[in-house]
C-alpha cells in the first residue's frame, strides 16, 4: 500500500519547495527497500556479519505533481518540471496535499485556476500543507481562518495583514493546526516533510531519512527561523567584529562587560556605545541571547538541563530557567520534551533536573 502525496505546482514555483519535500518522501521508499533486504546468512571465518532482523518496512509514498492545466511547469529558476496532472487526473483522493511556494503568491490577486486546483485536491485529503508562500493560497481559500500558521519571514507581516483571521507565527519553522500544516521559507519544507514522515512512520524512519539527506532532524516546528548568530548584523568596526566572532565560538567562556571590552581594546562605556549604535542592544542582552541559543541546541541534542546550563555559559539551572521563562515563556524541560522530535506537541510535566 502506498500513500499518495500531491504537490501543487505552477509556473514560477520555487524549485526547492518542490524538490525538498519530494526527496524526503522518496527516501522513505529507499528506507523501505533497505529494510526489505534479506539478512545475510552467517558464515565461517572472515566475511560480512549477518544483518540484524529487518524492521517492518514503512509504506512508500507515491508522488503526484498537480497543476491547474497539467503538463510542463516552468520553475522560478527556469528549470522545467514535467508530468504534472490536473486535479481531475489526480483522482482518487490524495492522502496529503503540499502546496509549494513562489514569489508570485505573495502579490495579489492569486490565480483563480490555482485556487480552484488547491480547493479540489484539498477537499478529500487527510492533510493539507504549504511550503513558504504556499500559505497565501490556503489563507485565500479560508482554510487557515482562526488557525495558527507561518510562512517565510519576509512575507509573514504581509500574510497577517492580508488575512487578519489567520494567527501568523512569524518565527516558527513549521506550524500544525488540525489537518493543516504550514512551513517557513524554502528549506523549511524539508523540516515540515520530515515531520509528516515521523507522524506516519515514527521517529526512527524520519531520522534515517534525515541521515540520508545529511540534514538535521532537530529543527522542530516551534524553533525560531533565526538564531542570534544569524540575526546579528555584521559590525562595521573591526574590534567589535572580532569580539562577536570570539563570543559566538565559545559562549560558555567567562564573558563579562569588562572582559569583552578588554577583548575589543575599548572601555566598557565605549563598548556599550558600539553595541547600541551597531546592534541596537547592550552587550549583556546580546550575550544572554547567544547563550540561550546555545542552551537550546544542547537540550535538543540530548543534554540535561544542568549540562546545558553549564556548557552554554548560563551557569546554573536556576539561571537557565529564568532566561527560558523570560524569552521563551517555558521551562528548559518543557522545551526539550516539546521539541525533541520534529513534532510540536503539548509538553508534559517533568522534574527540572
Image (tube, grey):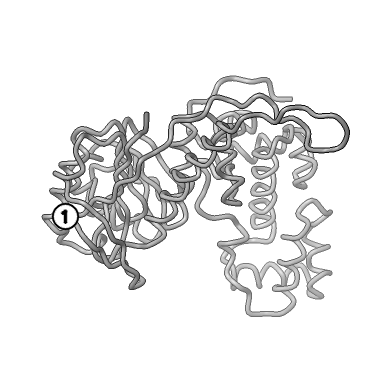
Residue positioned 29% across, 47% down in the render: 64
* Left or right position of 244 against 182: right
Q: Secondary structure at mark 1?
A: loop
* Left or right position of 102 against 210: left
Identify the image quadrant of residue 325: top right
Image coords of residue 170 (percent x, y): 40, 50
* Figure check: 289 above or below 271: above
Residue positioned 84% across, 69% down in the render: 262
- Nearer-the-camera pick, 34 or 125: 34
Residue positioned 55% across, 21% down in the render: 348
- Nearer-the-camera pick, 312 or 185: 185
Image coords of residue 288 (percent x, y): 67, 51
Crowding around mark 1 (Cα neighbors within 10 Å: few <14, some 14 to 19, many 20+) is many
For the C terminus, the image quarter is top right
For the N terminus, the image quarter is top left
Circle 1 is placed at which residue position? Answer: 68
Residue positioned 48% across, 26% down in the render: 346
Identify the image quadrant of residue 260: bottom right
* Left or right position of 184 against 258: left
* Figure check: 113 above or below 28: below
Image coords of residue 16 (percent x, y): 41, 59
* Left or right position of 323 against 80: right
Image coords of residue 281 (percent x, y): 60, 62
Total marks drawn? 1
Amino acid at each position: 500500500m502506498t500513500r499518495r502525496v500531491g504537490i501543487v505546482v505552477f509556473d514560477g514555483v520555487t524549485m526547492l519547495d518542490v524538490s525538498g519535500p519530494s526527496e524526503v518522501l522518496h527516501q522513505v521508499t529507499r528506507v523501505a527497500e533497505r529494510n526489505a533486504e534479506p539478512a545475510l546468512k552467517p558464515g565461517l571465518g572472515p566475511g560480512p556479519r549477518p544483518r540484524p532482523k529487518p524492521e517492518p518496512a514503512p509504506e512508500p509514498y507515491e508522488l503526484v505533481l498537480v497543476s491547474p492545466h497539467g503538463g510542463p511547469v516552468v520553475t522560478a529558476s527556469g528549470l522545467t518540471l514535467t508530468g504534472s496532472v490536473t486535479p481531475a487526473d489526480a483522482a482518487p483522493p490524495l492522502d496529503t496535499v503540499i502546496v509549494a511556494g513562489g514569489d508570485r503568491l505573495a502579490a495579489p490577486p492569486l490565480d483563480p485556476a490555482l485556487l480552484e486546483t488547491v480547493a479540489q485536491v484539498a477537499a478529500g485529503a487527510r492533510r493539507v500543507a504549504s511550503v513558504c508562500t504556499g500559505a497565501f493560497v490556503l489563507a485565500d481559500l479560508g482554510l487557515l481562518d482562526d488557525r495558527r500558521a507561518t510562512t517565510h519571514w519576509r512575507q509573514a507581516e504581509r500574510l497577517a495583514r492580508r488575512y487578519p483571521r489567520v494567527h501568523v507565527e512569524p518565527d516558527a519553522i513549521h506550524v500544525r493546526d488540525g489537518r493543516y500544516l504550514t512551513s517557513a521559507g524554502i528549506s523549511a519544507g524539508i523540516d515540515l516533510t520530515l515531520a509528516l514522515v515521523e507522524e506516519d512512520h515514527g521517529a526512527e524512519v524520519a531520522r534515517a531519512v534525515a541521515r540520508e539527506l545529511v540534514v538535521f532532524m532537530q529543527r522542530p516546528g516551534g524553533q525560531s527561523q533565526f538564531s542570534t548568530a544569524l540575526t546579528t548584523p555584521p559590525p562595521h568596526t573591526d574590534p567589535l567584529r572580532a569580539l562577536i566572532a570570539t563570543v559566538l565560538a565559545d559562549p560558555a567562556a567567562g564573558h563579562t562587560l569588562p572582559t569583552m571590552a578588554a577583548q575589543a581594546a575599548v572601555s566598557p562605556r565605549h563598548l556599550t556605545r558600539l553595541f547600541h549604535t551597531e546592534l541596537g542592544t547592550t552587550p549583556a542582552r546580546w550575550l544572554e541571547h547567544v547563550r540561550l541559543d546555545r542552551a537550546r541546541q544542547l537540550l535538543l541534542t540530548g543534554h540535561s538541563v544542568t549540562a546545558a546550563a553549564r556548557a552554554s555559559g548560563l551557569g546554573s539551572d536556576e539561571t537557565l530557567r529564568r532566561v527560558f521563562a523570560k524569552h521563551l515563556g517555558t521551562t528548559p524541560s518543557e522545551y526539550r520534551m516539546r521539541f525533541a522530535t520534529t513534532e510540536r506537541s503539548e509538553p508534559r510535566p517533568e522534574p527540572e533536573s
